[in-house]
Each structure stands twice: as C-alpha cells, then as structure tokens.
Amino acid sequence: MKRADVKVWFACNNKCLFCVQWDKRFHHKQRTFEEIKKILEDEYISWCRGLVFTWWEPTIHKDLTESIKYAKKLWYSQIQIQSNWRTFANLEYVKELISAWVTEFWPSIHWFKSETHDTLVWAPWAWAEVVEWIKNLKKLNQIIIINSVITKKNYTEIPQLSLLLAKLWVSQFQFAFVHILWSADKNKDEIVPQKSLAMPYIKKGLDIWKKYWIICMTEAIPFCLMQWYEWAIAEYNYMPETTVVDAEYRTESYAEYRWNEWKSKREECKKCSKFKICEWPWKEYIEIYWWEEFRIIND
C-alpha cells in the first residue's frame, strides 16, 4: 500500500544530538490546517492510502487531531503517528488521537539506560515517559512500532533494549543506522559508530526479537553485513512505496530518492550478487569510514 509521509511541524520539544532535521526549526513555520488538508487531498488523489504524520514533533501541532479526522473522512485506511512520545503524558490526548482514527503509534526510544537516552535527546525523564506510555498503549490494545537510532553511544545496549521491549510486547521494532546530517553531522565523532563493530550487537537484538515472534528489521545496513539476517533488511522486505511532503519539496518516491541521492555505491559493487537489490550505506558514512568493511557477495 502506497503511503504519504507528511511533515506537519518543524519545531520539536527535544534537541537530539543525532537529529537529521535540526536546522529546519529555524527556517520553517508550522503548516496551517488548510495547508495540511490540501496535502492530504492531493496525496489521496495520487493513490496514497496509508498516512504518516511525522517530523519534527507532530503531537505539538494544535490541529493534529483535526487533521487525523480529516484523513479519515478521505478514507485513508492506515494512519500512523511518529513521535518522541513526550506529549503523550496526557492520557486523554492519546485517547483523543485513537478516537480520531490513529491506527499505529511509532514512538522512539534509543537506549536501554535512561541516563543515556535523556542526555542525548536533551530531555529529562524522556526515557521513563516512553516506557510508561508503551505500557499504557498496550493496555489500550494499540499497534506500537518502535524505532531506535543506532549511534556510537548506544549500540552495545541494543540486546538489552531489545529484551526490554520484547517483554513489553511491542508490535514491531526497527534499528535505524544514524543518517549523518545536521546535528548528527556536527556531532559525528561522538555519534557515528563503525557498522562492523555494531553488527554483533544488532544481530543479538534481532535474535531476541525473533525468539519472541515480533517483527524486527534494520535500516541503512547493506546485505554484506547482514548475511543470514537478510530477512530483517527493511528497505528490501518491509518499506512500502512512499511519497514525502517535506518543508521545501515533495518526493514522489522515497525509495528512488534513497537510491539516487542518499546512498553511496562503488564500481566494485556491480560484481556483487546483491547489487540490484542492495541500497548501500549512506554517502556521508563512506566519507568517514570508507569501504574496507564492505565486501562482495558471490553466491
């Protein structure tokens, strides 16, 4: 099912050190309700039937609930909220979103240890709030999709975080390798790990999730580092066709944009048996660590 990723708000109540959209808060205003309605209408006409309200922090937009209700009137069949979760301290607000027709909640939690999470998102008590609201949403029988950004600060904690969230019985989990833009770029020395060092921990985390029969995946990790775990590569197995309505532009196909603009490939990759289906690493990653850890697959 084709979906639309709609950015409704360009401010945030966190200040994550790994944020890839940091600078937009200084240059772009929130979208009005009328602007959002027009976007929803246009994307529905372009055959989008899934909808994601996202970045920066959509839950601080005053018209989010009305926007969800309008999307329901247009017959969007799937409506997801991607959030840092802090606004959900208000239980009535969460119930309001569910009543409006949110079908999936996508909270972000990045570390097993609260002190690590709270320091890197610059928000005290953020970790405790996320965990508490995962519990509450389970009580409300909601679909919970977790995203964790892999950084140099947290990759050794991935198995512990996986076990915690598995025991909370979230619906789905994704390990997304940090994209090195804006804040992540400015803090890359302390934020960006070498992928080959993180892989043993990532695979342990995937093993835990598979044991609990929970859907789990990775993003921005090539096939050559995921052998025997190819089933978890999000870009190949799970990501739907998506249009992105950002602050400055609309991208008709997020997949094509990743392939042609954001990912890096080398001539030698053409020899790999996975060349036509592998998306390769972020361009910025290669500028830091080069190609030595990646190899050609011949099977």
Image (cartoon, helix red, strand yellow):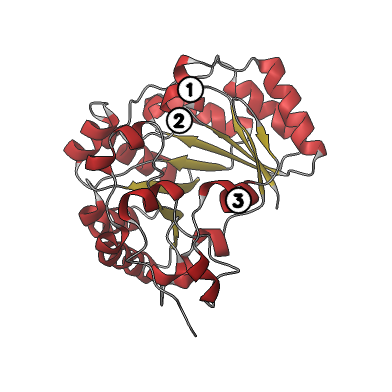
The residue under the point 39% across, 39% down is 136
Q: Nearer the viewer, residue 249 or 2?
A: 249
- Find disc 2 in the rendering and name its residue: 21
Q: Distance between the Cα atoms at labels 1 and 2?
A: 6 Å
For disc 3, the marked residue is 260
Give the SS element for disc 1.
helix
What's the amino acid at mark 2?
Gln
Q: CA distance from mark 1 to mark 3?
A: 23 Å
Q: Secondary structure at mark 2?
A: loop
Q: CA distance from mark 3 to mark 2?
A: 20 Å
Q: Which residue is mark 1?
A: 24
Q: Are marks 1 and 3 in contact (CB under 8 Å)?
A: no
Mark 2 is surrounded, within 10 Å at the Cα level, by few (under 14), some (14 to 19) or many (20 or more) other residues, namely: some
Q: Are marks 1 and 2 in contact (CB under 8 Å)?
A: yes
In this rendering, the label closer to the viewer, 1 or 3: 3
The image position of residue 239, as x and y in percent, is: 58, 55
- Look at the picture and state if 299 lies above or below 248: below
Amino acid marked by disc 3: Asn
